[in-house]
Amino acid sequence: MEHALTLPKVKGEKLLSKKSILALSALCFLFVLLSFESTAGSGGTAFTSIWTELSGWADGAPGKIITLLAFFAALFNVLKQNYYMAVGAFIGGMLLSQSVAIINIFLTGTI
């Protein structure tokens, strides 16, 4: 057993002290106290014009131009062999092309 590895032995240390247990309990209590049912507002038209403008940009020519530029940036980064930037640019372009649907999912409160 010349090449055997042994793990260090630790004498009965407590994993959690009383102070950390108290802090964790307080954090859990605050989480339960402050958690409440979230509901999306179904009425009101305060942001309708802004949302219409932004969704028009994302679906229209500006969104397509930015998505195309992100695609070309991904191709350029593949040629440079910088695959992380290529994947990031590609994912960014795909997210932009689907941004209206993604935001509509977030804004729709259903139970």
Image (tube, helix red, strand yellow):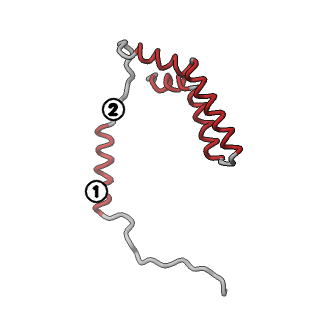
Residue name at image x 65 percent, y 48 percent: 82
Q: Is residue 66 above or below residue 16?
A: above
Q: Which callout, 1 or 2, points at the residue further toward the start of the chain?
A: 1
Q: Position of residue 110 (x, y in %)?
A: 46, 22
The N terminus: image quadrant: bottom right
Count of residue discs: 2
Q: Is residue 40 above or below residue 75?
A: above
Q: Amino acid at mark 2?
A: Phe
Residue 12 found in image quarter: bottom left
Circle 1 — which element?
helix
Residue name at image x 64 percent, y 82 percent: 4
Q: Is residue 83 above or below residue 104?
A: below
Q: Position of residue 6 (x, y in %)?
A: 57, 80
Give left or right: position of 73 versus 104.
right
Residue 22 badge: 1
Q: Amino acid at mark 1?
A: Leu
Residue name at image x 52 percent, y 19 percent: 57
Of all residues, the one furthest to the bottom in this rendering is 2
Circle 2 — which element?
loop
Q: Position of residue 106 (x, y in %)?
A: 47, 27
Residue 36 badge: 2
